[in-house]
Image (tube, rainbow, N blue to C red):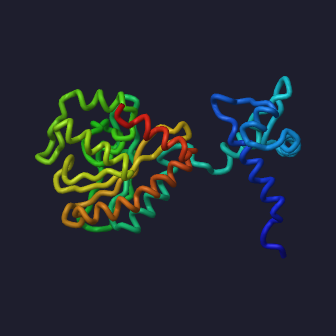
Amino acid sequence: MQETMPRGSVQSIDRAVAILRCFDARTPDLGISDLSRATGLSTSTVHRLLLAMVENGLIRQTAQRRYAIGPLVVQLAHTSGIPATLRDAAQPVLRSLRDVTGETAAVHELLASGHRVVLDQVESRHQLRRTYTEFGVPLPLPQGAPGKVLLAFAPWERQVEVLSAPLEQVLPDTITDPDVLAAQLAEIRERGFATSMTERTPGICSVAAPVFDYSGQVVGCLSISGPELRMPAEVLLEFGARIVPAAWEVSELLGATTAGREQAKEQASAR
């Protein structure tokens, strides 16, 4: 039995995917010439691929010989088990993070109000462990690793708004100096994760990485947290290297792209 498809078949798939990637909210329908320019393929090649894609429901023809995403794509998105929410997408990843690190893993959502909420957690099996109790309770962004990473990747205007207001000191190690916090936010954007050493909850250290959706905006984050006696600075850095790809796995399930992530990072950087 042949284990791989012929190169021509693979090339056709690559080209079909390139065509599908041309459609988005700004360009919901395109003509053959538009698709040829966007993909670099000849108009004859585009036309041949479109005929096959229309026949299989991947593309549909609209008025005036233009094309749009087909019904099969929509059907698959709704019926093939693709996670519809941040919580659903994060659940299996949280279990994996807990099993690898031994510590509690959680998913947090960014609210339109500029706060965050804890959506779910997978608790550590240690007797002494971090356990979230404030599910659904709005929490300020600057506090703790989850709050800081969400603020770091939020649009610059939101960051200015938060940094301009008084920063509440809930614990001795809570950051209340806006200049210090702004410098941390820049560092978080560069390395991709935030850390917190007992800044919001007594005796608890945490690390968090952002989650993006199909629009390219940060919508939440994953975190790993536990008692400071098991999570010194070097362990936080080790967990940071693990949580970044885990959070990106969730982002991809929500339709995020690397281009969208980089655009969000650019929008979050200081002007």
**Up-down: is 116 above or below 105?**
above
Q: Nearer the viewer, residue 11 or 169?
A: 11
Q: Tell me if 16 is positioned left or right of 55 in this view.
A: left
How many numbered circles are shown? 0
Quadrant assignment for the N terminus = bottom right
Residue 241's place in the image compared with 49, above or below, is below
Q: Residue at x 28, y 55 (%)?
A: 206
Q: Position of residue 150 (x, y in %)?
A: 36, 41
Give residue 101's position: percent from left, percent from top. Answer: 36, 66
Quadrant in the rendering for residue 122: bottom left
Q: Which quadrant of the figure contains the C terminus?
A: top left
Furthest residue toward left: 172
Question: Is residue 262 placed above or below 114 in the rendered structure?
Answer: below
Q: Residue at the bottom extreme?
A: 1
Please tell me which residue lies in front, 17 or 34: 34
Q: Is residue 109 visible?
A: yes
Q: Position of residue 72 (x, y in %)?
A: 76, 43
Q: Is residue 36 above or below residue 202?
A: above
Return the residue nearer the eye: 150 or 85: 150
**Residue 120 seen in this snapshot:** no
Indicate left or right for 148 with 9 as reference.
left
Q: Quadrant of residue 207?
A: bottom left
Percent from the top left, x then y, of residue 11? 78, 56
Residue visible at 32% across and 46% down in the picture = 146
Q: Residue at the spot x=51%, y=48% of the render?
A: 251
